[in-house]
Image (cartoon, rainbow, N blue to C red):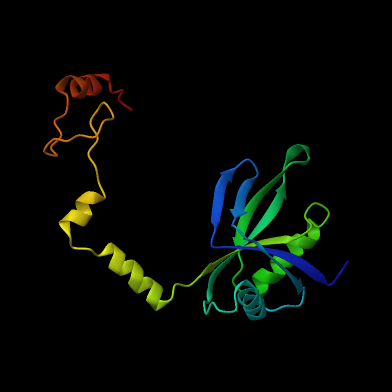
Amino acid sequence: MDDRVLLKVYYSGQILLQTSEGVKFICENPLDVVIPFTISFEELKGVICEKIDSEMSRKISCILYRYSIPVFGGFVQFETKYVTDEASIQEMFSMYIESHARISFIELYIEFEQSEADRNIIREDQNSDSEEDFESNYEVVGPDGDEDQGDGTVAPDVTDVTNTLVNEVPF
């Protein structure tokens, strides 16, 4: 067996939790990186940051490893573990070596710390005191699915409420 392994690194994407194969990582441009089995946790973070974008001065806040679990009939499900230190990297490599016949690379999902500038931009967007901005984000929809152009108050249908209360099944 080679002393290097291929990583497929996903970032700025999504983690789908309930797929037919279990957990799935998605992003527009996953990155392929070859690393040695002797790499340290800090070296791993440095290599990934360097390969993703040299102009990004971001720090990695979270690394998730996607690993396979054999289930009945030769099927495989995927779950995730956090990679947080040297021991978890060695565990990741051990799990990869055990499943190397089924899996040809290691999949990682990377999340970055937000810079102070990014957090300030988000706060400014969310902290608007304007009533017009608030109201423009919401619309009232009537029972028939049409937008309600009324005064914004909602009067429940007494018959619906009564039927709901009468038909409730006690636990």
Total labels: the figure holds: 0
- At 24% from the left edge and 23% from the top edge, which residue is drawn? 164
- Residue 125 x %, y %: 30, 64
Which residue is more in the foreground, 23 or 70?
23
- At 70% from the left edge and 52% from the top edge, which residue is drawn? 68
- At 54% from the left edge and 55% from the top edge, which residue is drawn? 14
* Left or right for 82, reference 168: right
Q: Where is 152 relative to 45, above or below?
A: above
In which quadrant of the rendered view does residue 71 lie?
A: top right
Which residue is more in the foreground, 73 or 153?
153
In which quadrant of the rendered view does residue 160 lie?
A: top left
- At 61% from the left edge and 60% from the top edge, which residue is drawn? 81
| Residue at the farthest right position | 1
- Residue 91 x %, y %: 70, 66
Q: Give the quadrant of the N terminus.
A: bottom right
- Residue 123 x %, y %: 31, 68
In which quadrant of the rendered view does residue 64 lie?
A: bottom right
- Residue 56 x %, y %: 54, 77
Q: Where is 135 relative to 166, above or below?
A: below
